[in-house]
Amino acid sequence: MDYQVKRVRSAEKGARISIAVYIVLAVSKIVVGFLLQSSSLSADGFNNFTDVVSSVTVLIGLKTARKPADHNHPYGHWKAEPIASLITSFVMLFVGFQVFLTSLTRLISGDIVQPSQSAAIVAVTGAIVLFFLYRYNLKLATKVNSSGLKAVSKDNLADSLTSLATAVAILAASLGWIWLDSLMAIIVSLIILKTGLDVFKESTFSLSDGFKTKKLAVYEEAIQTIPDVKAVPSIKARMYGANTYVDVTILVDGQMTVQEGHDITERIERKLYDEFDVLYTDVHVEPDNLKEQFNTQQM
């Protein structure tokens, strides 16, 4: 459990760095976008503002997730992390919708002005900074298996590409294609909405105890390599934050002693932990003469 807490603490570091970077970028883009009359740069700034909120939310979720179990939460507080991701998705969807309406209204009404080329410098700088932030957070999220930080890293990459596209739009608008600046603001808002929807899907999948069947097949195959395991009639899994919980039923020789059955469960738990980082495995042992009964239940 100490190892799991250390992993969450490591993920918190990535969230803190993201917060600091996004605050600087959001303020810079919104202010410069307003002063240099660039709608797309201002929209990109509001996009980064949503990232400040999302990173703060993820950080709170990570801190809550590592709280020890209590009588009301016997499994711990690990699900606070996907809950934080879910809240983040709501913020993204709300801000994205607001930016979309504002930008579309401005484009339709013709209330657009030619932006300064200097605004593109801010956008390019932001794109470079966010790309390096993406690489850092992705590497850290993969290392500690943090769904919240992975969501942040995906957002980092989307923001980097958005800032780069914003710079191109600003340059084109400054050369006479004025409408392109507002059009880019609309595209930015759609990217915010798409990212928010992706985070929403991933977090709700985890919170509803969804689990990828491909992983279950790999776990089952590994269990069946253990001697004396005759069959695996049932295997299920769910996620608690970054931690995997597996429930599996195995069939063994009905004449096996209780001690021998216990030893097999220990080997299964150790194998899944060492090879797949499964934190908890609950193994239910049944005699192999029940195989037909299990097959009937599954039909």
Image (cartoon, rainbow, N blue to C red):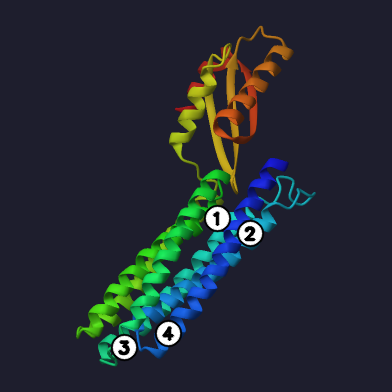
Mark 3 falls on what kind of element? helix
Q: Which amino acid does label 3 sit on?
A: Arg
Tag on residue 82?
A: none
Nearer the camera: disc 4 or disc 3: 4
The residue carrying mark 1 is 148
Q: Is residue 77 left or right of residue 189?
A: right
Tag on residue 32?
A: 4
Q: Is residue 152 left or right of residue 278?
A: left
- Report how far apart the C-alphas of labels 2 and 4 lie in the structure: 32 Å
Residue at the spot 54% in from the left edge and 70% down from the top edge:
52
Q: Where is residue 266 in the image (x, y as percent from the top left)?
A: 67, 22
Among numbered discs 3 and 2, the one appearing first in the sequence: 2
Rendered-image quadrant of the C terminus? top left
The residue carrying mark 2 is 61
- Report how far apart the C-alphas of labels 4 and 3 lie in the structure: 19 Å
Whether residue 189 is situated above or below residue 148 in the rendered picture: below
Give yes or no for contact between labels 1 and 4 (Cβ–Cβ under 8 Å): no
Q: Which amino acid does label 4 sit on?
A: Val
Give yes or no for contact between labels 2 and 1 (Cβ–Cβ under 8 Å): yes
Whether residue 49 is situated above or below residue 55 in the rendered picture: below
| Residues packed near mark 3 inside 10 Å, few (<14), some (14 to 19) or many (20 plus) | some
- Report how far apart the C-alphas of labels 1 and 4 lie in the structure: 31 Å
Give yes or no for contact between labels 1 and 3 (Cβ–Cβ under 8 Å): no
| Residues packed near mark 1 inside 10 Å, few (<14), some (14 to 19) or many (20 plus) | many
Mark 1 falls on what kind of element? helix
Q: Which of 283 and 31 is in front in this view?
A: 31
Whether residue 159 is situated above or below residue 6 in the rendered picture: below
Q: Position of residue 81 (x, y in %)?
A: 60, 55
- Report how far apart the C-alphas of labels 2 and 1 lie in the structure: 8 Å
Q: Nearer the viewer, residue 128 or 159?
A: 128
